[in-house]
Amino acid sequence: MEPGSKVDLGEVDAGFTDKHESHEHALPEIEADVARLRELQYLMYAEGKRSLLICLQGRDAAGKDGTINHVLGAMNPQGCTVTGFKVPSQEEAAHDFLWRYHKAAPARGQVAIFNRSHYEDVLVVRVHDLVPKAVWSERYDLINDFERLLYESGTHILKFYLHIDPEEQLDRFRARIQDPARHWKISDGDYAERPYWDAYSDAFEDALSKCSTRHAPWYVIPANHKWFRNLAIARIVRETLESLDMRFPKPSVDIEEIKRKYHEIADDDVNQAAPSNGENKSGKAKATNGSQQPSNPGSA
Ligand code: AMP
Ligand code: MG
């Protein structure tokens, strides 16, 4: 969403599939994006300078878990965390509303995935009057400030609203009922929230329009078709990571000396195997490590 723009979710086709006819048709693209995603995440981990925060929001059964499983599950667990946010614990509720989210924000080199996020505090909280309007209405600015703080510290932020329509939600609830292996996912709350569909739409629309910024954009993802949702998210995450122009850090050791000393690789072989970017010809590698200052992502 363009910063400052408004969205009418009733006007967004949840069944949109762009130019793709079917899952089979889109599969090669999804697989290529997901494979590249894994490489890029490894590069982010190795580089150790920037980080990525992915927030997944959507109604019950919109596909937050499925997105993590099918798209983001491709990432190497070593550089990735997933945090789900439920009704706040007593300890969480005793702190400012951003406390639990800030603790789960990614460290340099890491990808953090939020399954639900700080937006719950202007969604479920607003729809069910869990705090007075005077409190939740101030939170949009606080959220924007929080996201700017993360961004200024080297964290890139992507926020996905998974858009399904009420018929698709009911179909998915029915599918859960018919599959004993998914009964555990059903809660009374799922059905109890359905009468609040329009109130949630209003709350989502406000969150999306008030909190879509250059550095932390919202994306409305048509999600009736799971494969299209996967394709769209894999593509956006991939393109975002590509745009960071990340590089493997220079080695902290003298590779050429090690080659000569321990592997008996001759000078000629060393030259052939030298890095193609022309850097480091002297063999005097500079030590780099995770203690460097982050580069401002805006300049990346
Ligand atoms: P689920 O994601 O299906 O496991 O459900 C988690 C539940 O926690 C949902 O009903 C959310 O609305 C609820 N929840 C998440 N964050 C908050 C919050 N900050 N305040 C109140 N309820 C929340
Ligand atoms: Mg649920």
Image (cartoon, grey):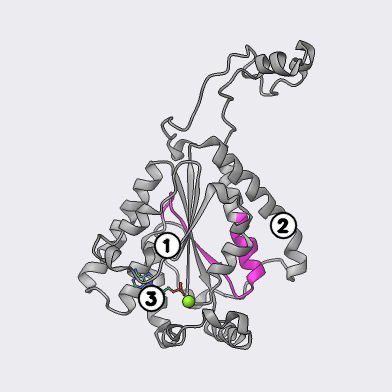
Q: Residues within 10 Å of mark 2 (few under 14, many from 20)?
A: some
User: Badge 2 is on which residue?
Assistant: 31
User: Badge 3 is on which residue?
Assistant: 202
Q: Nearer the viewer, residue 247 or 112?
A: 112
What residue is rendered at 59% in x and 25% in y?
251
- Whether the residues at callouts 3 and 2 have beta carbons within 8 Å, the answer is no
User: Badge 1 is on which residue?
Assistant: 5
What mark, if any, has residue 47 been given in the picture? none
Which of pointers 1 and 3 indicates the residue nearer the eye? Answer: 3
Give the image quarter of residue 212.
bottom left
Q: Is residue 79 above or below residue 194?
A: above
Q: Secondary structure at mark 1?
A: loop
Q: Earlier in the sequence, mark 1 or mark 3?
A: 1
Q: Does the stretch in magenta take in 54? A: no
Residue 145 picture location, percent across and down = 31, 52
Residue 289 picture location, percent across and down = 49, 29
Q: Is residue 281 above or below residue 170?
A: above
Q: Does the stretch in magenta take in 226? A: yes
Q: Which residues are magenta?
A: 213-235
Q: Nearer the viewer, residue 242 or 262?
A: 262
- Amino acid tagged 3: Asp
Q: Is residue 264 left or right of residue 251?
A: right
Give the image quarter of residue 256.
top right
Q: Secondary structure at mark 2?
A: helix
What residue is rendered at 30% in x and 63% in y?
92
Q: Is residue 149 left or right of residue 55?
A: left
Residue 195 picture location, percent across and down = 41, 88
Q: Earlier in the sequence, mark 3 or mark 2?
A: 2
- Amino acid tagged 2: Glu
Which of pointers 1 and 2 indicates the residue nearer the eye? Answer: 2
Q: Residues within 10 Å of mark 1 (few under 14, many from 20)?
A: few
